[in-house]
Amino acid sequence: MISLLLPASLLAQTSVVWTFDSLESIGGLAPHLLGKPRIIDTPVGKAIEFNGKTDAIYLDQHPLAGATTFTWEVLFRPDGDGAPEQRFFHLSALDPKTGADTQVRMLFETRLRKGGWCLDSYVSSTKGGLPLLNCDKIYPTDKWYVATTTYDGKMLRNYVNGELQGEGKLEFAPQDAGHTSIGTRINKRDYFKGAVRMSRFTRRAMQPAEFMKP
């Protein structure tokens, strides 16, 4: 069951790491499986692969709830034969009164283009939101990448392998507790075709030299 209270242990940690090498436990949490995501061996270690149609994982935690600044990184592999728009990671805040999903969220998506893919990310709060999408920068599919979003209290930025994709000013309020979907939107749409190895959530804005490497 999802807890709508922010765990003190979570808030006390500078970084939380989720490694996707098990279907029984991820980051100490019991995953809820949709479809048949599977463990695979890859050059970067064991990872979870999603089929782009029915596979997803849900976790009963929003690891950046309550954060005022943050860095969110995902080590993933986008396949070249998926849908044009795919949500591969979604952090959703829940209404503390009703427990329902809200429009307050953080997310990563891929946009498949001829010859590769580009990164789409979005962060919102009760004060508004900001999308960052730059398809002038196209990367080959079927390779491993680190997608990153940072927020330093004023500027929101996103990166692929440490290369800046976009930035903009954002007025932001800490998000409420919630839950997470991997491989699809929180409402089970726009499934992801590819694999996810790891995600790190840090409660400060890191510099590119500190990011995970693919």
Image: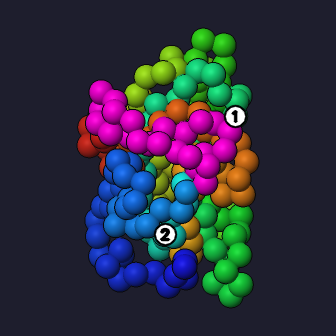
Picture layout, residue 214 above or below residue 157 = above
- Helix, strand or loop under label 2: loop
Amino acid residing under circle 2: Gln
State which quadrant residue 201 falls in. bottom left
The residue closer to the viewer here, 27 or 46, is 46
In which quadrant is the C terminus drawn? Answer: top left
Mark 1 burial class by Cα count in 10 Å: few <14, some 14-19, many 20+: some
User: Which residue is the site of mark 1?
Assistant: 85
Q: Secondary structure at mark 1?
A: strand
Instruction: Give the tally of numbered discs.
Output: 2
Q: Amino acid at mark 1?
A: Glu
* Quadrant of the frame with the N terminus: bottom right
Residue visible at 34% across and 33% down? 41
Residue stretch in magenta: 34-56
Residue 210 falls inside the magenta stretch: no
Q: Residue at x 55, y 67 (%)?
A: 179
Residue 47 counted in the magenta span: yes
